[in-house]
Image (cartoon, coloured by chain):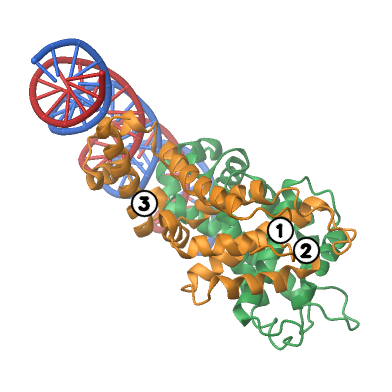
Chain colours: A green, B orange, C red, D blue
Amino acid sequence: MDRRQQKTRAAILGAFCALLTEKSYHRITVQEIIDRANVGRATFYAHFETKDGLLKELCEELFGHIVESAKDAVHTPGLYSNASAPQSVFCHLLQHLQKNDGNILGLLSGESSEIFLRYFRESLRGLVHGQVTGKGHKAACLPEDFVENHVIGSFVEMVLWWIKGGRKYSPEELDRCFLAVIAPVL
Amino acid sequence: MDRRQQKTRAAILGAFCALLTEKSYHRITVQEIIDRANVGRATFYAHFETKDGLLKELCEELFGHIVESAKDAVHTPGLYSNASAPQSVFCHLLQHLQKNDGNILGLLSGESSEIFLRYFRESLRGLVHGQVTGKGHKAACLPEDFVENHVIGSFVEMVLWWIKGGRKYSPEELDRCFLAVIAPVL
DNA sequence: ATGGTTTTCGTACAATGTGTTCGGCAACGG
DNA sequence: CCGTTGCCGAACACATTGTACGAAAACCAT
C-alpha cells in the first residue's frame, strides 16, 4: 500500500482513539478527527465511508486481533481444561488486555464503552460458542444458550468492573474470581 | 398542572417511545418526534431542554417507577429470603417487566437497548446495594463490590437475553435459572 | 533522475438538523 | 368572563455532514 495511505490511515485511527478516551463517540465530529489527524476533509472520506464506518473498522481491527491471539495461544479443546494446559482462554485474554494492546483499555474505560462492549461480546461469542455444551452435568436443566450468554456476560461485566476500578487486580486473581463465580455452569 | 401541558408532555413521551421501538435513538430527529406527537417545535423545547433531556426524563420516570414498585412489594431484608416472604426482589421485577409496564420491554428490545440498560443497571444498584454483604460464607475471599457487580450484571444480561429471545420463559422459570447460576455468591 | 500515477489539500457547496425568537391565537382556571 | 398561560408556525443563525474539483505534492517504477 502507498506509504501516504498508511500514514493517513494511522493518523486518523490514532486521532479517533485519542478522542474516544476523552469524550463520547457521539460528541466527536469528523472535523475534530481530521483536525487532530492533520488531514483534509476529502481525505477522510476517501478512506472511510463515514464516522460509523471508521468505528467499525477500528473495532474489527482491535477485537479481531485480540481473539486471534487468544485462539492461537490456547490450543485446548475446553474453556477450562484442568489437564496440563497452561491456562484458560479467559486468563489469556485478561493478560492480553493487561498489556493494553491497541488501546482497548482506553476505549473500554471511556464514555462510549457500550459501543465497544458490543464488539467485545461478539468476538467472545465466536471464541466461546459451543464450548459450554456437554458440561450438562453441572448446568442441569438450564437452556444452553442461556448458559453461554451468562458466561460471556459475566466475563464482560467483570472486565468492565476491573477497568473502571483502576485495574487493582492481576489477570490471575481476576481469573480466580471469575472461576469462582462461574463455577456452577462450567 | 395545566391540562395542555399534560397532553403535550404525554404526546411527546409517547411518540418518543414509539420511535425508539422502531429505530436507533441517534437516528431519531426532533423533527420526527414533534411530527408524530403533533406538536410545534418551540413547544418541544419548552418542555424538554434537548433530546438527551427527554431521554433522561423518560428513563427516570420508567425505571424509577419499576424499582419503587419492587421496593414496596418486597419488604424482606434480604435478596432471597427463604422465610415466609412471598418472593425474591428479582422475581417481582421480572413479573413487573412481564406486564410490560410503561413500554420498558419495547425499549430494551430496540436498537438502543444499551442506553436503557445503563439506567436499568443504576436502578438495580440502588435496590441491591448493601444486600450482598454479610453473605460472605459463600462468596469467600471475593471483593464485595465485585459480587454486587456480578449479581446486577448477571440479572441484566439475563433479562436482555430473555427479551431478545422472545420471552419464551415465565418470570418464575427465569428466576429459577438466575438463582441456579448465581448460587455461589448468594 | 524523470515521468506518469496516485494521494492529498483547500475550498466551496448543498443538505440536514439544532435550538431560539417572536407575534398572534386558543385554551385554561378562578 | 377576563387575565394568564401554553401552543402554533414561521423564520432565523448556527453547526455538521458528505460531496466536488482543480492544483500541488508525494509516490513508485523505470
Residue at mark 2 to residue at mark 1: CA–CA distance: 8 Å
Residue at mark 3 to residue at mark 2: CA–CA distance: 36 Å
Q: Residue at x 81, y 52 (%)?
A: B133
Query: Quadrant location of residue A75?
Result: bottom right
Q: Secondary structure at mark 1?
A: loop
Chain containing the residue with disc 2: B
Q: Quadrant of the N terminus of chain A?
A: bottom right
The residue that mark 1 highlights is: B79
User: Going by the image, does B31 lie left or right of A130?
Assistant: left
Chain containing the residue with disc 1: B
Q: Secondary structure at mark 3?
A: helix
The location of residue A73, given as percent across then percent down, is 79, 74
- Viewer-side label of 3, 1: 1
User: Going by the image, does B173 lie left or right of B182?
Assistant: left
Q: Are marks 2 and 1 in contact (CB under 8 Å)?
A: yes
The residue that mark 2 highlights is: B186
The location of residue D15, given as percent across then percent down, is 39, 31
Callout 3 amino acid:
Cys
Callout 2 amino acid:
Leu
Q: Dot 2, how many residues are within 10 Å of its Cα: few (below 14), some (14-19), or many (20+)?
A: some
Q: Dot 3, how many residues are within 10 Å of its Cα: few (below 14), some (14-19), or many (20+)?
A: many
> Which of the pair A121/B46 is nearer the observer?
B46
Question: Closer to the N terminus: mark 3 or mark 2?
Answer: 3
The residue that mark 3 highlights is: B17
| Number of marks in the rendered image | 3
Q: Residue at x 72, y 62 (%)?
A: B80
The location of residue D26, given as percent across then percent down, is 53, 45
